[in-house]
Amino acid sequence: MKKRSVSSGDRSTGDLRRYLTKKSSAPPTDDGADETERTIPNPPRNESDPIPPIIDESTHRPKRLRLEFDPNHIIPDPALRIPIEDYANEIRDEVRRAYLLKGRTEANGHVFEQTLDGKVWRSFQRSWLGKYDWLEYSVKENAAFCFYCFLFKKTAQPNTFGNDVFSRDGYSRWKTATAAFKKHVGGPNSFHNIARGKCEDFINQRSSVSSKIHTYSKESEIAYTIRLTASLDCARYLIAQGEAFRGHDESSTSINKGNFKELLEWYKDKNSEVKEAFEKGPGNALMVCSDIQKQLAKCCAQEVTSVIKSEIGDRNFAVLIDEARDSSIKEQMAVIVRFVNNQGKVMERFLAMKHISDCTSAALKEALLHLLALHDLPISRLRGQGYDGASNMRGEFNGLQKLIRDDSPHAFYVHCFAHQLQLVVVTVAKCSKCISDFFNHVPLIVTQVSASCKRKDTLIAKHQDVLLEKLENGKISSGKGLHQESGLARPGDTRWGSHLKTLLRIYQMWESVVDVLTIVSTDAREHSSVGGAGGLVKKMECYEFVFILNFLIGLLTITNDLSQALQRKDQDIVKAMGLISDVKTRLQDVRDNGWEPLLDQVKSFCEEYGINVPNMDDLTVPMGESVRSKNKVTLRHYYKVDIFNVAIDATMTEINHRFNEVSSELLVCMSCLNPSNSFAMFNVDKLVRLAEIYEADFTISDRLMLRSQLQIFILNIRRSEKFHGCSDISKLSQLMVETKKDKTFPLRIFSAMSIIKTDLRNKLSDGWLNDLMVCYTEREIFKSIDDAKITKRFQSMKDRRGHLPKERNVIT
């Protein structure tokens, strides 16, 4: 079998490697040197020099070494990593600690590639990872590597078996792998065991030179632990509340040193033991500086993601991705994973927030794959993708979903239903000239009424007077949570439900809004303000505005109920399909039978507020045409055909267009597992076809037995009283686990288909923003993590000036 290896030159072509380091084929000059790199000079004549020069084998010139390292740029795949000697000497320990904290790459859940060795197909065996605690696997090159040798091997050890093979090139001769592994380990003085010993000494901070120079008493360790725990308590509180850490002025003379330091001062005042530990502690180990705050946040985030990864385990999962621009004008990509946990419950967990400088589909794919690899989530287990409808995300030829499916064919893409529904609402707002003109005036009303604090206060006061009058007259009733103070909100195309919210506020505060506009028009000193506010009063008090307002509130209420249902975390796609069908039926019913009730509602509103109701048999001209036009229609035709019917038809057309996925084969097959009405849609043939679609999750024997098992399954489930009344797939999945029928019918088909930044904090680094977002979003997990786990991880990040008690000072 031909040996597959990766040379240093090959690795330098990797996308991540090129991103993290640069090599020059020309002699380096001071003018062209990167500020994050330095050039090692010509080889020194003195052989005792402690830092020998490193020569690039391909160019025979000194290498450029990186002087900076970002733990977020760890490369999980061992075949693509930058060798430790390519980093500057002063940051190599930082790099080693970052890789040790992450741990070796085991490619959990990956299906190992088979290669033909003579006449036998062979592959890497997962049992080797359990037997050899140093072994790593490269998905990219289908080769084995040594974690200890990567971190601590000696450079330039020629003719030594396994030194470069297991740390740089990779071993892929699976037939002789066991013997090669044993030979690589060798005896007590082998290069592998020397590297392993160095690693163990490096992990044990007490064996470091600085620790041996300084002596640490038991009392000093206890005081250090108290200081660290107090700082962690303050950090955890601020993270959980989403509050800022730093202050504008943190000097000793400042009266407000920021939330973290002020909270810590309060803590010390309330606890004399904590106060004493800080007062007697060394100035260089007080655990209060900004770097310590960031490191504590990072440890918290890493523990949260560790819990999330343990929840996922080796299960299949889906990803939900969205992009947003933060207050510092940076494009951020949020990644959420969706999976079924041990209890059969569908879970959504926030995995990470990543800054992206390029929004092309290729760049997004690279960022996503690196993020998944960093969290040990192989793309081979990806079974679903959910994005918005941007062309770079959903494109059929070059979109992100297509590029991901090229690597993972079973990662099927579904456009976010809630996002599609919002696009339907946006279309309705522009479906006719009349409704478009209506929505042009709505923001103007909001602006005029809310342009100043005085106007807002007047609006609220007027509304309170109206409510009191209605309460006295018995038109409305009082109760807890009713008639809360509120204002007007501006509608936005990207804010779900904002159109309906704005219209409801105008409807509820009608008298107050008209009164405020009248006051603005009367008190205005400039004629432009008089005309603006006065014109809006005239516009609002015409029949057409009232008709469209009442009509759209009813129409958008139907779609808003669907939007709220689609945004539920436990919503499954089969139930969503049913909800969409219900909305279509409701819209058709409104078109057929809703005209007369709407006219009565509008007439009642006009009579209450003194607005003239026109005769529906009078003639008028369509909007945009001159009064001299001969193309005149009755008002009944104008309101019913040009507004009422057009808006409903546009809504139904857009829903049919946007949600055409519901007719796809995949979703039709999935709908057969809908437990409603005692599994009325159950279809064995379509479920067998679903198993064929997800062929990677079923062996040939699984598919052969599936038809018979499904027939037994449906008979068993229909007899079970616990499944009576089960209405959705999410609940079905949980009941399967509760009744242990997932063991009786071990069909993976049931899980396969279920698949903080403000304007005042706009200088948060990408890493810190991600750490805070992970902890804040997953507060339930964050609050359940024990302090000891976080302090252990914190202590292991670097060589600290203080030590925890021996039983706690361990890298986990």
Image (cartoon, rainbow, N blue to C red):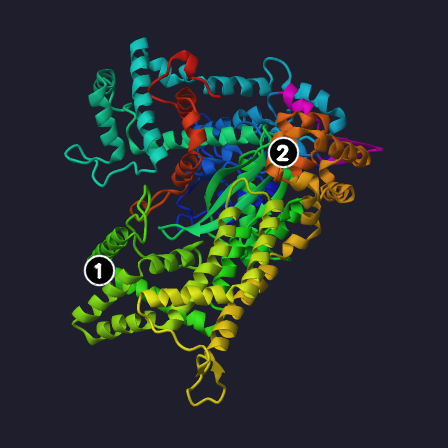
Pick whichever of labels 2 and 1 is earlier in the sequence: 1
Residue at figure coordinates x 29%, y 21% from the top left? 227
Q: CA distance from mark 2 to mark 1?
A: 54 Å
Residue 299 — which label? none
Q: What percent of the width, then of the height, locates residue 513?
A: 28, 62
**Residue nearest the viewer, comparing 53 with 90:** 90
User: Hey, what amino acid is under mark 2?
Assistant: Ser
Residue 325: % across, % down: 41, 52
On the image, which quarter does residue 492 sit in? bottom left
278 relative to 407 in the view: left or right:
left
* Residue 17 in which image quadrant: top right
Which contiguous range is marked in magenta? Answer: 113-132
Please, is residue 187 above or below residue 396 in the view?
A: above
Question: In the image, is residue 128 part of the stretch drawn in magenta?
Answer: yes
Nearest the eye: 99 or 582 = 582
Question: Residue under circle 1?
Answer: 455
Residue 214, placed above or below residue 724: above
Residue 577 place in picture, x, y as percent: 61, 50
Residue 81 seen in this snapshot: no
Q: Residues within 10 Å of mark 1 (few under 14, many from 20)?
A: some
How packed is label 2: few (under 14 Cα within 10 Å), some, or many (20 or more)? many
Res 619 seen here: yes
Tell me the residue that label 2 is attached to: 733
Q: In x, y percent, where is residue 541? A: 32, 70
Q: Secondary structure at mark 1?
A: helix
* SS under mark 2: helix
Q: Is 198 part of what is drawn in magenta? A: no
Amino acid type of the residue that numbered disc 1 sits on in the rendered structure? Arg
Please indicate whether residue 464 sits to the left or right of residue 362 in the image. Answer: left
Q: Nearer the viewer, residue 220 or 626?
A: 626
